[in-house]
Amino acid sequence: MKHYLQLLRRMDWLLFAAMACLAVGSVLFIYSASYRGPGQEMPSYYRMQAIWFGIGLLVYLTLALVDYRLICQWATIWYLLAISALLLVLVLGARVYGSRRWLGVHGLGLQPAEFAKLAVIVALAYYLFHRPAETRRRWQTMAGALLLTGVPAALVLIEPDLGSALVLIPICFGMAFVAGVRVKHLVLVALLGVMIGSLGLALMWRMKE
């Protein structure tokens, strides 16, 4: 019990407060957007948001009491599960507005792309921070980080879900920078990505013409 109390004291409560404010704000925004006027029945969207916020809060506090090193030891498993889920949603996912992003499980919708974001963070943390400091400054380290991020990003893009795919890129760059990867490697990769992205967009526009 004393160990758990110490972990709670070491939590970043400022970050927790910011997260809680954003969650509460989301419930209020949904309530405001779905309000239909006096005497009109309100949709249950804001209630569901509040329920999921409560569930997420319990999961957050539970995981906060788990040693992060234990989570990282299972990094390969989390990563492979995320890749499997992303492949599964491409085959069995519900098609909504032309995209396959959701898996239906007993009436609940699960979005594997969200789980993939967490799995990529854990995988990158294990990959980057379990390597010697001098090794992290080599080009091969950045290439490995890009590969770990690129596979799930490509699968998410196929769904297609451009927003979630693009979120993985700053995650990779941010963690690589904190881990000590050379800035020039980050800049070169960023420039290469901009060039490839621009070429891809140009080809897409030409194909539409």
Image: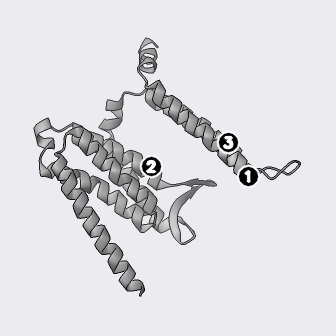
Q: CA distance from mark 3 to mark 1?
A: 10 Å
Q: Give the image quarter of residue 51.
A: top right
Look at mark 2 in the image and give the residue it sits on.
115
Residue 62 visible, this angle: no
Q: CA distance from mark 3 to mark 2?
A: 25 Å
**Label 1 sits on what residue type?**
Ser
Side (left or right) of 7 relative to 126: right
Look at mark 3 in the image and give the residue it sits on.
28
Q: Residue at x 18, y 44 (%)?
A: 181
Q: Can you give x and y, in whole percent of width and height, for residue 30 in the image? A: 67, 48
Residue 204 visible, this angle: yes
Quarter of the figure that contains the C terminus: bottom left
For label 3, the SS is helix
Binning the other alpha carbons within 10 Å of mark 1 as few (below 14), some (14 to 19) or many (20 upward) gives some
**Label 3 sits on what residue type?**
Leu
For label 2, the SS is helix
Q: Can you give x and y, in whole percent of width and height, for residue 68 in the image? A: 35, 31
**194, above or below 186, in the image:** below
Q: Can you give x and y, in whole percent of width and height, for residue 120 in the image? A: 35, 48
Q: Can you give x and y, in whole percent of width and height, for residue 56 in the image? A: 55, 38
Side (left or right) of 25 relative to 35: left
Look at mark 1 in the image and give the residue it sits on.
34
Q: CA distance from mark 2 to mark 1?
A: 28 Å
**Front-most of residues 84 and 59:** 59
**59, above or below 33, in the image:** above
For label 1, the SS is helix
For marks 3 and 1, the one nearer the N-term is 3
**Front-most of residues 153 and 76:** 153
Whether residues under marks 2 and 1 lie with C-beta atoms below 8 angstroms apart, the answer is no
